[in-house]
Amino acid sequence: MSAPGPGARGTATGLGRVLVALYAVFAVAAVSRAGVQIATRFGEAPLAYALSALAGLVYVAATLGLARTGPRWRRTAWVACTVELLGVLAVGTLSLADAAAFPDDTVWSAYGRGYLFIPLVLPVLGLVYLRSESQHGSQHGSRRTARP
């Protein structure tokens, strides 16, 4: 693997490391929970369990996108965090507005209330982090290209 270039995200320390760790924990938790629910009780709440599986896949994508370097992984992280935020807002709102449609909770139900609202805060932190890294990288890159 090549060394990170200018603007590459440094997820080995600081907020980047915390985000990767949190996304990895949520990926394992959501995929595992959804797998058990789908295998054992899918008929009870198919929408909720399918949405939990989707959330798990989004967390996997965000984990990989944040943990790896390069423009393709950065795009993956942006898309995953955006999809997660939209999912949390949509499912959170729907689960409160139509509780009968969600007889069992998803990771994103009630904006992630069952997970201390971390599913609501996590994509916001991820997007803020990605934006700050993007701005830092473009500033750093423009200084490099200005030199002869």
Image: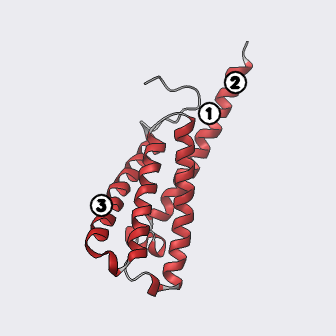
In the displayed structure, does residue 17 sit left or right of residue 41? right
Q: The N terminus lies in which quarter of the figure?
A: top left
Q: Nearer the viewer, residue 131 or 41?
A: 41
Amino acid type of the residue tagged 3 in the rendering: Ser
52 in relation to 94, above or below: above
Neighbourhood count class around disc 2 (C-alpha, 10 Å): few under 14, some 14–19, many 20 upward: few
The tag on residue 143 is 2
On residue 137, the disc is 1
Residue 120 in percent (x, y) is at 50, 64
Choose the circle earlier in sequence order: 1 or 2. 1
**Count of numbered labels shown in the rendering:** 3
Quick one: SS at disc 2? helix
Which residue lies most toward the top here? Answer: 148
* Residue type (three-letter) at the residue carrying disc 2: Arg
Residue 93 seen: yes
Q: Quadrant of residue 29?
A: bottom left
Cβ–Cβ under 8 Å for marks 1 and 2: no
Q: CA distance from mark 1 to mark 2?
A: 10 Å
Q: Residue at x 33, y 79 (%)?
A: 43
Front residue of 7 and 71: 71
